[in-house]
Image: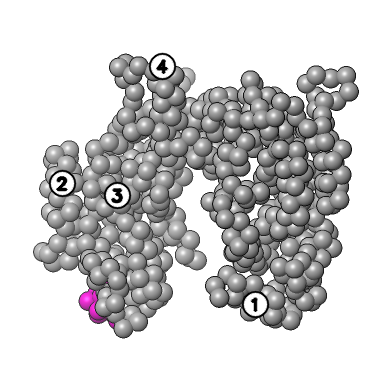
Amino acid sequence: MTVVSLKLEQYRDAEDLSDIAHILDLKPAHISYALYKLPTHQKYREFTVPKKSGGVRTIKAPHNTLKVIQKRLAQDLLLIEQQLEQARVKERDCILAHGFKKKLSIMTNGENHRGRRYVCNVDLQDFFPSINFGRVFGYFSKNNDFALKPKVATVLAQIACHENQLPQGSPCSPVISNLIGRILDIRLNELARRYHCRYTRYADDITFSTSEKHFPIAIGMRELGSINLWAAGPKLLDAIARTGFEINPKKTRMQYHYSRQEVTGVVVNQKVNISADYYATVSAMCDHLFKKGECHIDVGGTKQPFSIRKLRGRLAYIYQVRGKGPKHRQTADDKDDQVKGSQQRLWSSFKLFERFLNYADLYGVDRPVILCEGVTDNIYIKSAIQALAAKYPTLTNAVGDLKVKLFKYTKTSASVQQLGGGSGELLKLVNTYSSRTRKFKIAPKNPLILVADSDDGSKPLFKVIENRTGKKVDGSHAWYHLESNLYVVPIPKVGAADTPIEGLFEQILLDTTYEGKKFDRTNSEKDGTKFYGKKTFATKVVAANKGSINFGRFEPLLTAITEVIEDYKPKIAPSPVPALAPALV
């Protein structure tokens, strides 16, 4: 029996709220307070965001106490949904709903309709609000896959619903809507197959496509007296109504093979792609960000602020759809102009994303950024800062919230920015920093601080530092300013020996045995039978016991980082206005 099916069995065996709390690894009092004691008006915070098509969307963000419960429930339901789906279908292209699922996206949704003669899009009206408390309770209590006890189904519905509907903004609304929407998917897929069409759904966005000579009027037909306006067909309307949903009549549209066809925002005529208009808008927003330090979006003819976080999401979406792009520019020797143009577009979108990440994560940051050699270094430094908070108010506040950012290595940083960790990556960053940032027209407000081990691996980097600054990297200087907002802080040496960051811990901590294994900082013991590596040391030994660890050897490092922050402040301070000479009387 798999872990996932065991999880479903836990819910089936549950009797009441206490059992649900146990499954979610929470205290019953936590759930009781969120559901029954927290005042209704405090459970959610409402705000609006502009829609791409105009108007606004109301978001209901749950109180943190409730959000914790919803996130854990969502994780369980996603796991269960994935297991149930794997048991039903063998191929990914048999999956009907592509929204809010691991390894599925608007791209996989659009791929199903690539190169078809007709692509028909239909929108569901008020998708989340149409799923009320009764439907959620009924699904969990009566659906054959779940068949939960009434008390348990009631608790889950109370966790999920607000004001008798699934709120848009709750972590568990997407997965519950997919579970309940499965009967809709089954019926619409049967309808599609009957008329030789293909069907998929992404949240409330339904798509039918076919390469038949005529599109079936049972699914969609031209409005009376119109050539371009389409309406849902009678069979489609009936199938949707019988599953408790409604169509938004204003958003039914037909796209032909000779025009641009879009499915959930991606162009699907010949290959899944981004529309030129969408890319141009995002590119213009980036250009304004790089020049002015802010970006806007046009909503109803007026400019409204657009967050860097949202712009990052749009660029990540373009990168996901278009792919990584070529590793080199196309040359004049390329024979096929069409291929050449396509490759150039891929390159341009890739470089735009790279430039944005360099701005957002290294240059235009709202706090000082510390960039170490690896993920575990971040854990060490964060633990040290929090343990020594009273001595370093520049780096953290009294409750342990950092006033600096620790650069996070990700798959995207490795593939797009060529920042995957290690001393070699720090050297590459130092050598390319000018070219990475030359198109940014505003001065950076905070320093970028590279923290490098004092060992053989950093010697090429230290050689570059010596050539640029004329200063030896031998312990006589705690930090080095290279250019703009770029600084390097070598790990302070312990004695005369080479010192990686782990060398700042006392030997008694490095000798800690965990689950019968000893620490191997080289990570060479791949099977983990005798030794454990840096990740385990960082999370299970250091972070888990930071309150009792002696971080005294980290103080010179944190002092150097603090000095860098103070050194950079005058570099961004506005020049003082000269005093006016006193008027002659």
298 over 170 or under it: above or below: above
Tell me the CA gap for discs 1 and 3.
48 Å
- Marks 4 and 3, the one that precedes in the sequence: 4
Mark 4 crowdedness (10 Å alpha carbons): few <14, some 14-19, many ≥20: few
Q: Residue at x 78, y 21 (%)?
A: 228
Closer to the eye: label 4 or 3: 4
Q: Secondary structure at mark 1?
A: helix
| Label 3: how many Cα within 10 Å (few below 14, some 14–19, many 20+) | many
Return the x and y of residue 107 as percentages of the image width and height.
56, 40
Nearest to the observer: residue 408 or residue 415 = 415
Query: On the image, numbered disc 2 is attached to which residue?
Result: 460
Residue at image point 78% right, 32% down: 216
Residue type, numbered disc 2: Pro
Closer to us: mark 2 or mark 4? 4
Instruction: Report the disc number at residue 337.
Output: 4
Q: Amino acid at mark 1?
A: Gln
- The residue beneath circle 3 is 450
